[in-house]
């Protein structure tokens, strides 16, 4: 099985940079995902890391260290619309990539 | 708009009853996944179907069942409902194997309230 831990909430101001951490313990591992979920809405895909290192995609970057069981999502130039819950999720080795184990989510609040 | 359609959006029913949630995947996606999101458990994988066949099973109760039809739409059946089954039920779809990124496309969800 999988166990993922992330902080329950983070706050930051508009224009700032924020990092959301995720640690995981797995019996097998096939990649780490980040999803964004606005209140009452569907989760939307942000990133997928299967190898160590940093993946940059516009204002969002995601980092993975498999040896440390650690990932983070970095959000730059924060905007009010970035206020949402950010979910990290892991896929099992040998399992379909759609079978994901999600963390409880980190609620990001961006203040003006 | 993810392209995944779920109905109904909201459903209120009583304990002991049975409901059916419906999902139409994105055009071309053969895999359908069901997830349950509740306040105390977070987002949990229930079951996956691929081209009509069950592919993977998660924390799905025996009172729950699902199927995928030849036109690829899927239904999640919840029976003998309990208060604790109140949750947001998401359907998601993907290309086979999740494609290059493993991205799942989620529907807007069906919010079930059991009274």
Image (cartoon, helix red, strand yellow):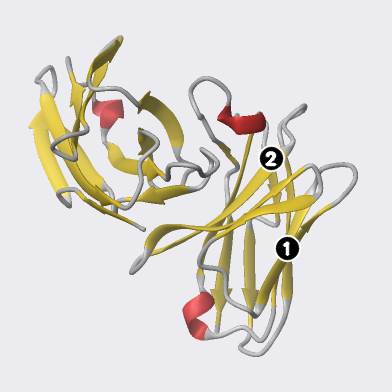
- Tell if the residue under mark 1 belongs to the same chain as the one under mark 2: yes
Q: Residue at x 14, y 49 (%)?
A: A7
Counting from the top left corner in percent of width and height, residue A20 is at 16, 35
Residue A112 visible somewhere in the drawing: no
Q: Which image quadrant for residue B106?
A: top right
Task: Look at the picture and state if A73 lies above or below B42.
Answer: above
Q: What residue did someone put label 1 on?
A: B66
Q: Which mark is residue A57?
A: none
Q: Which image quadrant for residue B40?
A: bottom left
Q: What residue did someone put label 2 on?
A: B31
Local packing at callout 2 (Cα closer than 10 Å; few below 14, some 14-19, many 20+) is many
Indicate the quadrant containing the C terminus of chain A: top left, top right, bottom left or bottom right: top left
Q: Residue at x 51, y 73 (%)?
A: B86
- The answer to whether residue A74 is left or right of residue A13 is right
- The answer to whether residue B18 is left or right of residue A60 is right
Counting from the top left corner in percent of width and height, residue B88 is at 51, 60
- The answer to whether residue B89 is left or right of residue A57 is right
Q: Residue at x 50, y 29 (%)?
A: B102
């Amino acid at each position: 099985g999988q166990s993922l831990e992330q902080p329950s909430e983070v706050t930051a101001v508009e224009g700032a940079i924020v990092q959301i951490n995720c640690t995981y313990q797995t019996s097998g591992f096939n990649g780490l995902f980040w999803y964004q979920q606005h209140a009452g809405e569907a989760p939307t895909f942000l990133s997928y890391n299967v190898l160590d290192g940093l993946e940059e995609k516009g204002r969002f970057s995601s980092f993975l260290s498999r040896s440390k069981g650690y990932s983070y999502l970095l959000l730059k130039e924060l905007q009010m619309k970035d206020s949402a819950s950010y979910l990290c999720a892991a896929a099992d080795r040998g399992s379909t990539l759609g079978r994901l184990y999600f963390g409880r989510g980190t609620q990001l609040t961006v203040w003006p | 708009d993810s392209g995944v359609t779920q109905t109904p959006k909201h459903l209120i029913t009583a304990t002991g009853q049975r409901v059916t949630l419906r999902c139409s995947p994105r055009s071309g996606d053969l895999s359908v996944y069901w997830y349950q999101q509740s306040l105390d458990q977070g987002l949990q994988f229930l079951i996956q179907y691929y081209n009509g066949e069950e592919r993977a099973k998660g924390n799905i109760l025996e009172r729950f069942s699902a199927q995928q039809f030849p036109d690829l739409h899927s239904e999640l059946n919840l029976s003998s409902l309990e208060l604790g089954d109140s949750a947001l039920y998401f359907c998601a779809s993907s290309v086979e194997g999740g494609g290059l990124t493993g991205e799942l496309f989620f529907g807007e969800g069906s919010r079930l309230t059991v009274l």
